[in-house]
Image (cartoon, rainbow, N blue to C red):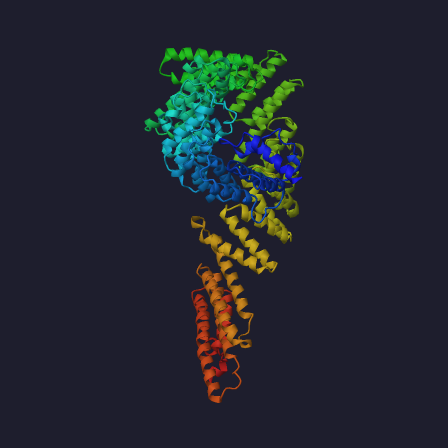
Amino acid sequence: MKYWISLSLLALLSGCSLFGGNNTIGSLKSSKTEQSDLDFANLDHQQVRQEYQELLDLVDDQFLKEQIERRIAGVSMAGGDQQQGSQARPQRGYYREAINSYIDILEKYPNSPDNAEVLYQLSKAYEMEGEINNTEAMLKRLVTLHPDYSGVAEAHFRLGDIRFSHQDYRQAEVHYRASTRTESPQLSLNAHYMLGWALYKRGLFDDALESFALVLNRIMDSDGSATDQQGKPMLPDTLHSISLALVNIGGADKIDDVRGLRNKDWIWQVYENLGAYYLEKNRYADSAATYRHFVRRFPLDRRAPDMQNRLIAAYTKGAFARDVLLAKQDYVQAYGIGSAYWQQADAPQQQTLRASLQPYLRELAAHYHAQAQQQTKLSTDQRDRDLQKKARQSYQDATGYYALYLSSFPDSSDRAQQRFLKAEAHFEAGQFSAAAADYEQVSYQYQDTKFNNRAGYAAILAWQQRVTELEKKPAEKSAAQEQAVASMLRFAAAYDSDERSPAVLTNAASYLFSLNRYQQAIDIADELLQSKQKLDKKLQQTAYGIMAHSYFQLQNYAAAETHYDRQRQLTPAGPEYTDISNRMAIAVFKKAEGLIAAGQKPAAATELLRIKQIAPTSSIRVAAQYDAAVLLLGNQQWQPAISELEELRRHYPQHEMAAEFPRKLAFGYEQAGRLKDAAALYLYLYRNDQDETVKRDALFATAGLHEKTGRAAEALEFYKTWARNYEQPFDNRMEARYHIAVIYDQQQDMARKLFWLRRIMEGDAGAGQQRTDRSQWLAAWAANEYGDYFAKEFSSRRLASNLERNLPWKQQMLQDAVSRYQQAADYGLLEFTTRSSFRIASLYQQFAAELRGLPVPAGLSEQDAATFRSIIADQATPMQELAVAVYSSNIEQAWQGHYNEWISNSYQQLAQLQPARFNKHEQQKRYGDEIR
């Protein structure tokens, strides 16, 4: 059977056309012949190799022998591929047999024209085995000996990769450059890309850019998409590589210097990618500069507005407020309606431009308006002409942008608001005629419910200012007065239910005589009502309304309330009745304000609570009830205040003032002694209030109330949460640390107590100008507590129990305790100075006593024992002297007029230590004794 297989193989080799030229192993494996009827698919690689090996013994022709050995090597290679995917790695490797076979062929047939393919396959086998040095050696041999080999470009590319991975970028460049000469488009593309990176790594950024640009030119379409599907994945990497190179040579300013990027329709992608790279690296100014370079270089490009928007976004992200403003101005100027760009843009482009122009114009107008207001506020001194000039320019810019917005978006939903703001800017700039014209357009043309009567009244004020302005120009003043009267009458006719209408009518009737003569209006209305002429109900309503409003303007709120009430009695239920009730409520509110100013707060609270009955649905009802509750709290009427606040919280949870209700209610609970209710509500505020300051203070209050109500564990967690999250206010920070230390002391958690004691001392030490008497007291207290800890440790071991071990330990504890006590004393507070002195002296006294109490070691001679006692005395005596000296320092405080328990205790100790001096008792002599 094997004989026939060998003959079949021989026939296959003889008839196959694959043994000449530069045929690869892959093509050999795929060859077929009609001369073999063997089923090679059912033979494994080992069997095939064995058959080929046996065939060698049957062949004498050297050419056939060479081809058989190549085929054996190819089968070994295929076997390695198969083993690699199906079994664990053999000890010798998957491709060792193939490697040996190829090496053997090269040695046997050194001059064979087919050795190029052998070297190629051998390099591949070495690479599969991870032997990169051998791979490189074979590839070098291949490109040197066989420069015309069809795969030489690929070999150069692989050599380039190897050199690149070894950071030998110069040689990598050589091989990649050689590889670019291939006829394979994809390989050439990859070679140019990697050539760019080799140049980049060498710092040859300009050359690298040209190489990357060549890659883009091959794969990019005019619209910026990849035309070559094989090159499409390279597009983002190549753009990113270009960005990296540009960053190294100066950014967008150098794009025009790259020959391969000139006059390219897709150049916008380079700018966009570079700008995005800078933005990602938080280089906001460079990102913006990149987009600006594109906009200036290609002002009419369809992507220029988007680039300008990206520029704005970069400055916005970098928080460059001034640059954002200027960039938006540039956008409006370059792409606004009527600009050269707008004229050449199609309808979809114009719609896109509108989407940016509208918010930018609003923002620019609002900015310059606010800037003008601030400049005006700061330029109160008439001598500050420069600032006044800037304010006038800012108002001009603001009104200009408002006007541009209104002309660009005449039908916008916020046109009334924007024209109203334009009028406000004119008014603030002293341009009263222009302001009045805009106000009247808002009021009588736009019919916007939010601004109509507000704008109509503002127009009247503008005309009044114009009249005052023309005081020294009688002719012009007369014309302005006519305009003012017309505006007043127009307002009164359009908004007769407006609460300002009576004042407008009064002004219209008396304007030719003077401005704001409310008493004249009252007199006229009162005369009308007192006349014998029968007045219809409507006229009476109007008269009472004019009087009420005039009294209101004169701040006679009690009279205003009376006349609003009379007007209301003549009015049937309905909207008008409600309006009058609301005005009456406002009058009562104002009356209450007067009572508050006069110090009559209880009476003011009573008046405010009346508003609940006068106008229960009034917009000021909630504010009035809330203000009344605040006044009750201030008057320590806790329960009435609590009742009002609970009602407000219950009925108006969505009111704009709703956040204030629980804040004041918690305070009320606390003051009323309902501490658990207060603690729960403060906790609610901490978890739900939107004001960070309120949340902070509520958390601190919660902690304190939990501590007061005996819930120390919960209090501890709240204090710790406060301490972790807040550094200010400084006083609360120190108090929180103090309470944490106290609670840990109660829990006998000494390690954590010591930590917070240190935090207290550190807090005071680093407080700077925030330091207070209380913070110093807390720091002194903490230092004393720390000293007590070391003092306790000092006392916890008896010196006599183990002198050699305990003596150095007690000395250290003594030193640490004295250091902390001294630190407490350094704060200069009598309480802690005397306490620290007493505690230090006590420690010295105790140490001396323990030294004297040491027993004489056993086994000493009488002389040695005496020496031991002498040494101990020498050590103990200075300690006791120190104790006496420190106790005496407290006595000196008494001589200076101070006295406390620590001074008293010091006297007692000194009486024991030096009785001759400090334990004297005055001898009282009887009168009879003195005679004797």
Residue 43: x percent and y percent? 65, 38
Is residue 399 visible to us here? no
Residue 272: x percent and y percent? 45, 27
Residue 443: x percent and y percent? 52, 15
Q: How many marks?
A: 0
Residue at x 32% of width, y 28% of height? 383
State the residue in front, 305 or 583.
305
Is residue 21 visible to us here? yes
Q: Is residue 236 left or right of residue 650?
A: left
With respect to residue 218, does 657 lie above or below? Answer: below
Q: Is residue 100 left or right of residue 251?
A: right
With respect to residue 252, does 725 lie above or below? Answer: below
Residue at x 46% of width, y 51% of height? 772
Q: Residue furthest bottom?
A: 862
Which image quarter: residue 878? bottom left
State the residue in front, 8 or 375.
8
State the residue in front, 930 or 289.
289
With respect to residue 297, does 883 lie above or below? Answer: below
State the residue in front, 494 or 714.
714
Q: Quadrant of the N terminus?
A: top right
Residue 19: x percent and y percent? 52, 32
